[in-house]
Image: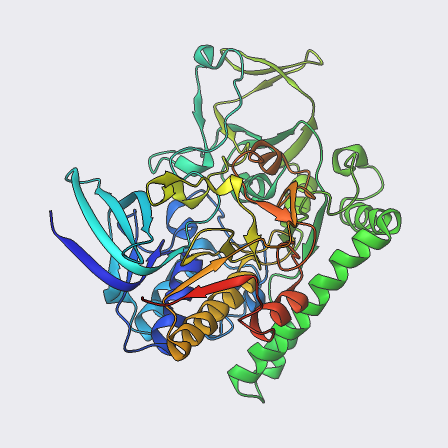
Amino acid sequence: MSTTHFDVLIIGAGLSGIGTACQVAAEFPHKTIAVLERREQLGGTWDLFRYPGIRSDSDMFTFGYKFRPWHDSKVLADGASIRQYIADTAREFGVQDKIRYGLKIVEADWSTAEERWTVTALHEATGDIRTFTCGYLVSCTGYYDYDAGHLPDFPGTDRFQGRCVHPQQWPEDLDYTGKKVVVIGSGATAVTLVPSMAGDAEHVTMLQRSPSYIFSIPALDKISEVLGRFLPAKWVYAFGRKRNIALQRGLYLACRRWPRQMRRFLLWQVRRRLGPGFDMSHFTPNYMPWDERLCAVPDADLFTALSSGDASIVTDHIDTFTEKGILLKSGRELEADVVVTATGLKIQMLGGMELSVDGQPRPLHGQMTYKGVLVEGIPNLAWVFGYTNAPWTLKSDIAGAYLCRLLRYMDESGHTVATPRDVENSAMDIGMLDQLQSGYVQRGKDVMPRQGSKEPWKVLMHYEKDSTMLLEDPVHDGLLQFGAPA
């Protein structure tokens, strides 16, 4: 069994993986780089999800890469456009030919003696085992299980005579034209599906156990459209990016500092769209804004579908599935030809890969994150994880830039190994996302890394502070310990 060696090995060819690979390739043209991707195409999330209306829930000024502007006027872009943007970026930076597809990473083991990672991959199409070694390993695998989404154990599903689908495995042959559809869920996927399906279905019912905060944003950025007539596209993108970062951070801070006032504001903008006669209990969560992530909808499309009668919303609990649909705890039965279970994701770290050091298992949940990028006690490993309270790519961008700083420092100083060490005993029994009450986060607490009581072990989720810590603070801080060949 042959082994192929690379200086830097990146796992995952989605938004984070391609972005990181582009930065490393541009900064270190002399280094050998490869990207291992399980799927047969790049794109990650944006290749996997194919349900109607699939789009970003963050604006593309901040969801796009800082180093490659997004030029479309759409604020919330559709999935196909985002995947094309990722592919075009890979091609422009010469990364496309560095991707090896169809490889599921099974395990990675660090050898202290050899100062390298050995990565074992399964080529799923043939069953062949392939081995790679690298000096530095970078995981860009996202945070959820690609094989299956979260699906509660609903009673009676075997009795249902219609079709039941999960958005993560959307069937290409599903025709819901003229049919009654029930979408179970109240998160970003559900609020995207309902207006997208409402135009073709006979009727779409959004069935939620509890409401989420939902707000409307313009589908097109008219300010940027006007500026684009007079200014270079790069300037327009930079301006829109800075503006939207400030607006998003301001919204988040306002929700945390003045939760009751922001709650009233968010409910007011829904009421204004739906009119005074609409039952606002369907949009009034039992938690404060940003205890869970807010859901954005373009041009109030969800509210338009509800107002037109093409869609409706029901807040109740499921008693059981029936032959004709879903029986609720209230006794009401929702008839359905198609049920879509938009019930969330299953948290998975490192794409399910087993991690070890000198043959000893090192599960990620037993370690702290260092600056939200490296992992306590594990040499030469970067773990790129984006924001949950802001666009994902804001963090993955600066994580990639930090990795380049670190690799540059190691090259210039002659070091070959970098390992974060908690010499101050900063560890706390707190998960990195414990501040969020979202169901998928709470379900995945046991697999996520921990955080510490102070920086750089504390997860900040703050773009400006993270930018300073990752891009300006000294690389050698006494906690990141370096070694060189004997």
The mark total stands at 0
Percent x, y for residue 465? 67, 67
Residue drawn at point x = 55 percent, y = 52 percent: 369
Q: Is residue 385 above or below residue 202?
A: below
Report the quarter where the C terminus lies.
bottom left
Left or right: 222, with 87 as reference point: right
Q: Quadrant of residue 96?
A: bottom left
Left or right: 111, with 204 as reference point: left
- State the residue lying farthest toward the front: 486
Q: Nearer the viewer, residue 204 or 401?
A: 401
Q: Is residue 52 above or below residue 43?
A: above
Percent x, y for residue 290? 73, 47
The reply to whether residue 441 is visible in this rendering is: yes
Q: Nearer the viewer, residue 164 or 410?
A: 410
- State the residue lying farthest toward the bottom: 230
Percent x, y for residue 226? 62, 81
The reply to whether residue 85 is visible in this rendering is: no
Q: Is residue 135 above or below residue 240?
A: above
Left or right: 36, with 394 as reference point: left
Q: Nearer the viewer, residue 75 or 395?
A: 395
Scheme by which the image is coloured? rainbow
Percent x, y for residue 131? 20, 49
Q: Quadrant of residue 194?
A: top right
Residue drawn at point x = 28 percent, y = 43 percent: 104
Q: Nearer the viewer, residue 439 or 212?
A: 439
Residue drawn at point x = 57 percent, y = 82 percent: 228
